[in-house]
Amino acid sequence: MQKEIEAKFLNVDHDKIREKLKKLGAVCEHPMRLMRRVIIDFQDKRMQKGGHSWIRVRDEGDKITLT
């Protein structure tokens, strides 16, 4: 199974970052989009606490994934 790493950055000036990347020759391959997710676990969160795991359902806009 592939490992997924997700990072969140707060207070980012997207336009400024895009401009810097463009000047370096970067090309946007996937436009930014809103992804909604729901974490499924027991009320006592035993999956997250015990095995550091959970079930995630994510709406990626064009598809729904279950992980």
Image (spheres, rainbow, N blue to C red):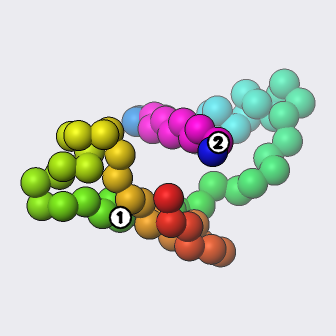
Left or right of 21 on screen, residue 67: left
Task: Name the amino acid, label 1.
Answer: Val
Q: Residue furthest top?
A: 24
* Residue 17 on the magenta span: no
* Residue at the disc numbered 2: 2
Residue closest to the eye, 14 or 64:
64
Task: Name the amino acid, label 2.
Answer: Gln
Circles 1 and 2 in contact, beta carbons < 8 Å: no
Q: Residue furthest right?
A: 25
* Residue at the disc numbered 1: 38
Identity of the residue drawn at 41% across and 60% down: 56
Nearest to viewer (mark 1 / mark 2): 2
List x then y, in percent, for residue 35.
Answer: 50, 62
Q: Is residue 33 visible?
A: yes
Q: Which residues are magenta?
A: 2-9
Main SS category, magenta section: loop
Identity of the residue drawn at 83% across and 28% down: 23
Residue closest to the eye, 6 or 49:
49
Rendered view: 42 above or below 21: below
Rendered view: 30 above or below 8: below
Left or right of 27 on screen, residue 12: left
List x then y, in percent, for residue 5.
Answer: 54, 36
